[in-house]
Image (cartoon, grey):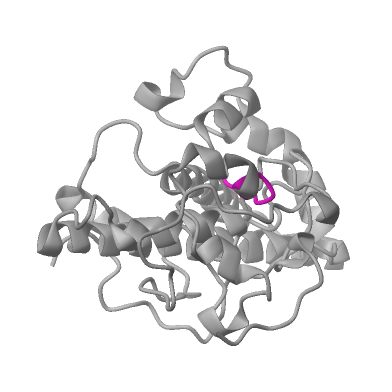
Amino acid sequence: MPHIKKTSCQQTGALCLNLTSNLFANSVVRWTAAKSAEKCASTISGALPQPIRDFRIPVSKAELSMGQWDARAPQRIHYGVPELISYEYWLAVWKCWDGESKKNKKKQKNTKTQKERADLIDTSRKNAGARFLQAMLARRIVLEECIANGVNDERIKSLDEFLIRDHRDWLFVEFDELPDDADMYLAADPLHQGNNKMFETGWGVNVNDISIMLGQADDAWMSEGLDLSEMFKKEMDAALKRLRDGAEEIHITHDENAELPDRWHEVP
């Protein structure tokens, strides 16, 4: 299995992020703090029936526009609560940046600083749109597999892949670009409790993280919807500064030349 060499679990394409200023700038979810390299897990408590040897979910770096998303509203599938956490989170982040981008377009931009800020906002919107599209694409593939094959040996292979890649921040990484310690994670059952510590070195989102982030004592957001607007207002300027300064962990997930997949939505 070819992998690009990386020296530690903290070099899998991103560094540990704080829960504050850089949250929206790079449009990457990392609520669980990354552990130091020496604490990387080295054993698997529960193995997948078959290790992942290729990716079922392709990498898409195209930007999904809010107009394209809204046009699909009548056919949208609702799975109940909670849906895939990453899906809900990236939708909320994307809406924040899209709203800010639209609001900013109405303002005059006479100075270099104003024009630079507008560009940074648009970049953040594009990154968030690409992130949400990837989560949407993953969800469709999982759904298609369930409809076509049901649950084989109590596993949904595309869902296992999504969970592992989401935990390790590999949703925008091609298979042959994985770090050299990837085999361990690709063979581990992401649903096995014994592997929780192993995946703690990643940046997956969980329900408790979101409740803490919103300052809530419960999980009311599950029924009321995920609204990040207040947090967005507080953190936006710091996030744009990190993007402008080219912070080491910032990732530009959007590719201007990428085309929208033929089937990213949930219905034919």
Q: Could you tell me residue 29's position as x and y percent?
A: 61, 49
Question: Chief secondary structure of the magenta span?
Answer: loop
**Does any portion of residue 114 appear in the rendered image?**
no
Q: Name which quarter of the figure residue 264 lies in.
A: bottom left
The residue at the far top in this view is 217
Residue 77 lies in magenta, yes or no? Answer: no
Spot occupied by residue 252 in the image (x, y as percentages of width and height):
66, 70
- Out of 22 and 18, give the one closest to the viewer: 18
Q: Is residue 80 visible?
A: yes
Does the magenta-highlighted stretch encompass residue 200? yes
Q: Quadrant of residue 161?
A: bottom left
Q: Which residue is at a point 22% across and 55% down the rendered structure image?
A: 153
Q: Residue at x 52, y 53 (%)?
A: 98
Q: Position of residue 214 (x, y in %)?
A: 60, 25
Drawn side of residue 244 relative to residue 101, left or right: right
The quadrant of the picture occupied by the C terminus is bottom left
Q: For the view shown, which residue lies furthest in the right direction?
A: 245
Above or below: residue 179 compared with residue 81: below
| Corner quadrant of residue 139 | bottom left
State how many labels appear. 0
Q: Is residue 4 above or below residue 191?
A: below
Query: Can you give x and y, in whole percent of width and height, for residue 52 in the image?
Result: 43, 70
Q: Quadrant of the N terminus?
A: bottom right
Q: What residue span does the magenta drawing correspond to?
A: 199-204
Residue at 55% in and 45% down: 195
> Which residue is drawn at the image coordinates 60% and 31% (left, top)?
209
In the picture, measured across the screen, residue 137 lies left or right of residue 1, that is: left
Residue 169 higher or lower than 255, as above or below: above
